[in-house]
Image (cartoon, helix red, strand yellow):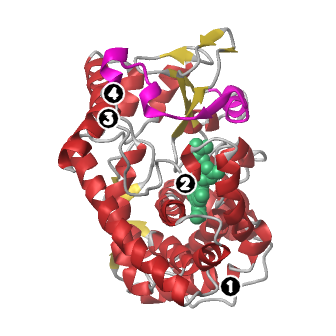
Amino acid sequence: MKAQYWVRWLSQQGLPRLVLRTQARRGEPFARLMGGPDGIADPYPLIEEMRGRGRIMRTSLSWASFDHELCRSVLRDTRFGVRNNESFDIPKPLQLLADHSPMPPNPVEPPSMLVIDPPEHTAMRKPVASAFTPRAIAKLRERVETVTEELLDALPSGGSADLIASFASQVPIAIISEMLGFPDADRARFLAWGDQLTPLLDVGIPWHAHHRAMKAMEVMNDYFDGHIARLRREPGDDILSTLVTAGDLDDYALKATASLLMGAGFETTVNLIGNGVVQLLAHPDQLDRLRAEPELWPNAIEEVLRFDSPVQTTARTALTDVELDGAQVRKGHTVVLSLAGANRDPKIFPEPNRFDVARPNAKDHLSFSNGIHVCLGASLARMEGVHALRALFERFPDLRLDGPPQRRKLFTLHGYERMPVRLGRRAEAETPEPSSV
Ligand code: HEM
């Protein structure tokens, strides 16, 4: 198994890694952006450097765009499909190394809906989509409020905490675990698997990170076998039980879907909450405005998503030769789409580097992508973000950072891994007002 993993790493990660590191050493901004050895703390200056080169540009590895309109149109364009690592500009003879042997089901390989095109995509997404409609999610609101309040009650009034471990990761993992019928006791395992698997979303990760991810996949696969067998015997009223009893998906597809929903369900929203805390503490005038006008909270969440996108990029591969703004993108070539770059496009967002919770068009960000792969969990993430951030700042009005928060060493997922805070006094919980979120 180890040899197979090594070949897979070499073809999918090792070769792009070599290209990126060589280019990064020469100072190429795209390679520095994607291949920073320790993750990029502040990607925005490099994004602006790239934007200066035009709406679409050739890079050492692929095409790339940081332009809102162009990214959005590629995401909606049926001449493009989802990314395929082998479509990066690696010399053809080296591509022969590519390994196609079967892997344990996982979120970043077929049949995960994230990485397949229609008609298979439609068949995989449809059975899950009904559980994530805005109406279905609205029914979860009370549960999100209760979970949030319980977590805030457990934080030490007047004390210190790591806000990521004790709050930002806990809200989304509690909710998605319940939605998928996983026992509460298994949340810590999922957090650990999440840490090990998320580097797979990046390009050019080192061998040790890749190997850890493969190992986590194997263990998670065994866990899912047991969980699915249990649900088959005693189905609950969760999404996975519904999928298991409907019988549309085989076990491999069920496990790929479960791992995608689980991972997407908390690995992104933790960043929304964490990034939101940092931005609001850095902009006390904006926090004051939210205290005076709490009806602005839903818009503030859109602005957090726009300003510091939890998912920084995605990519699409041309299914045929395509001309884009004068660039000839050949069939099989990849376009990296910077969602974070699109979100700071000054043509769409005036003064894009200003954090403004009342920005009228904040919601036009591309943080949830667009087109057929648009985030299935967007309504859920928005609701969790609003309740978690609002309740946190209401219950701990004197919250302060207690040292610099530490960024996750990832490129695609953009958030914090540790956030030391001083909580200050805890205010009593107010009975939540009815809200439209
Ligand atoms: C702030 C939180 C979140 C962000 C920023 C986010 C972002 C994204 C993005 C950018 C994509 C599309 C990638 C692409 O086009 O290539 C996506 C897809 C997806 N997201 Fe989210 N997501 C979030 C929360 C969630 C949650 C809570 C769930 C719930 C389980 C979820 C489930 C999914 C699924 C299933 C897909 C695949 C959809 C498809 O391929 O058709 N996401 N998300």
Disc with the residue nearer the chain's start (1 vs 3): 3
Res 13 label = 3
Residue lying at 40% horizontally and 67% vertically, measured from the top left? 164
Number of dots carrying numbers: 4
Instruction: Establish if 60 lies above or below 363.
Output: above
Label 2: state its secondary structure: loop
Residue 412 on the magenta segment: no
Q: CA distance from mark 4 to mark 3?
A: 5 Å
84, above or below 280, in the image: above
Residue extent of the magenta highlight: 67-96
Q: Earlier in the sequence, mark 4 or mark 2?
A: 4
Measure the C-alpha gap from mark 1 to mark 4. Answer: 46 Å
Secondary structure beneath label 1: helix
Nearest the camera: 29 or 405? 29
Disc number for residue 142:
1
Q: Are marks 4 and 2 in contact (CB under 8 Å)?
A: no
Q: Is residue 278 above or below residue 149?
A: above
Residues at circles 4 and 3 in contact by the CB criterion of under 8 Å: yes
Where is residue 154? Give x, y as percent.
42, 88
Separation (CA) of disc 3 from disc 2: 38 Å
Query: For the point 29% across and 29% down, which residue is it?
Result: 17
Q: Nearer the viewer, mark 1 or mark 4?
A: 4
Residue type indicated by callout 3:
Gln
- Disc number lying in front (1 or 2): 1
Label 4 vs label 2: CA separation?
A: 38 Å
Q: Comparing marks 4 and 2, which lies closer to the viewer?
A: 4
Residue type for callout 1: Glu
Q: Secondary structure at mark 4?
A: helix
Disc 4: which residue: 16
Between discs 1 and 4, the one toward the N terminus: 4
Residue 283's tag is 2
